[in-house]
Image (spheres, coloured by chain):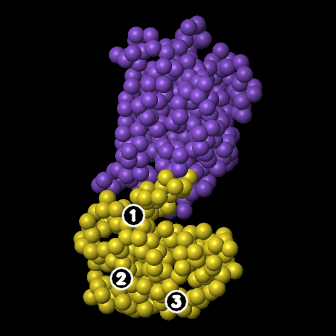
Amino acid sequence: MKRHLISAADLSRADAVLILDTAEELASLADRPIKKLPTLRGRTVVNLFYEDSTRTRISFEAAAKRLSADVINFSAKGSSVAKGESLKDTALTLEAMGADAVVIRHGASGAAHRLAEWVQGSVLNAGDGTHEHPTQALLDAFTIRRRLRGTGPSGARGAGLDGLRVTIVGDVLHSRVARSNVLLLSTLGAEVTLAAPPTLLPLAVGSWPCAVSYDLDSELAKSDVVMMLRVQQERMTAAYFPSVREYSRRYGLDAARMARLPGHAIVMHPGPMNRGVEIAAEVADSVRSTIVEQVANGVTTRMAVLYLLLGGMEFPATGVAQ
Amino acid sequence: MCAASSPVAGRDGVAVLDAEEIRRALTRIAHEILERTHGGDGVILLGIPTRGVPLARRLAARIGEFEGLDVPCGSLDVTMHRDDLRLHPARALGRTELPPGGVDAKTVVLVDDVLYSGRTVRAALDALNDLGRPRAVQLAVLVDRGHRELPIRPDYVGKNLPTSQREVVHVLLAEVDGQDGVMISDGGR
């Protein structure tokens, strides 16, 4: 494992499988009376959030606390950032406070990468602009593996996602979740297809390790997993489709489309959902939907990542602060 | 701190127990457990990964043969409770699997392959503490090689093996290593 987790591309197949196996062992903690381990006692994890987030921040906080780390929450609102402090100065302040890990969410793509040059501890990217969100991809991979490759003693341990067909649908252009998932799922051996209108695909999509389709209906029958993306209206500065109704009719997942999936197929959504736009309420609440599981698996997967980055020997200091 | 979890080096060491002797030692321990716990009532066996787990299973099978008693058997991973985590890169976790009914008010027999510094057992006691409140905790090991660093003693011992701290003890089990045997080699060559 590398010292930081900035991009899903930082993870080799062996790293990714180790994280999933570790998460699988940690999952049993949720059923125990004491849901806490002493492993990161005395370590400090800073949650540095420049963008609004509920589930990711709470998920990282719960994960760190279950490993007995101290958690400091920092949100840009009501901090010195409002007075104009730069990311670098904030980073140096955190450094002086002795943060062992910094979990950062930032509106600018590449912010986590820059931060890693300034702090000694590990940097975990919790979403940077439209670039990446690697822990979301890990929890999605973990959810897929548990649902389709089994759990239990010998079930999925050591396994990847070889041969599974995953279709990622919707606003790929603005989605850091899509990019991280394409990279990670293909590392794990899955065949990924993006289904989206041409206006919502990035220009460089041809260089990604995945197939592209403009027609969702033709992909449904051969998908083991359908991952719906949120239509990110807050990032949309131009008209990408004629109307929400038209988008919903062509790329939304409703009951009729769900019925055309194979019997074992699952439906995922990273949340928060726009019910009635990309996903119909009856689909979101169906037994195929893993949306609630994804939240629970998020805590487990982030515990695994924090343990593997912080639990062992300190990484040798390589990157010298600039 | 059982030095037995790295079977890479020193397989060419001296054999101190062969498969037959391991079988006899386990048979004796199974009888001792039955004796000491008045027929094995309320006993559960928890193996410490990696090699404690198959040992616990073998003991449970042996007790089943002797008394027709179905002794619950599980595993207890202690990695997250170790005191030497920061001396190594993060380790992969083993499995913790409790028998249905848990450990509350049971007599838990911890099973491991080698007892050395006692630090693994200390970690196991801590891990157990978070899982419930057993009535009593006992310790069974295949090999006690001495050099304790903590006030911990075993209740059941397969073989006492006087060693120097330079030596390395390897326990091989068919379930993990394809064959049974205990080897001792000079680690400091």
Chain identifier of the purple chain: A
For label 1, the SS is helix
Q: Amino acid at mark 1?
A: Ala
Q: Nearer the viewer, mark 2 or mark 3?
A: 2
- Chain ID, mark 1: B
Chain B: its colour in the image is yellow
Which dot marks residue B155? 2
Q: Looking at the image, which is closer to me, A144 or A180?
A: A180
Label 3: which secondary element: helix
Marks 1 and 3, the one that precedes in the sequence: 3
Query: In the image, is residue A79 above or below residue B94?
Result: above
For label 1, count other residues whose C-alpha is less than 10 Å away and answer few (under 14), some (14-19) or many (20+).
Answer: some
Q: Which mark is residue B65?
A: none
- Quadrant of the image containing the C terminus of chain B: bottom right
Percent of width and height locating residue B106: 28, 73
How much space separates mark 2 and mark 3, taking CA atoms?
A: 18 Å
Please check whether the numbered discs 2 and 3 fall on a single chain.
Answer: yes
Mark 3 packing: few (<14 Cα in 10 Å), some, or many (20+)? some
Closer to the N terminus: mark 1 or mark 2? Answer: 1
CB atoms at circles 2 and 3 under 8 Å apart?
A: no
Q: Nearer the viewer, residue A251 or A26?
A: A26
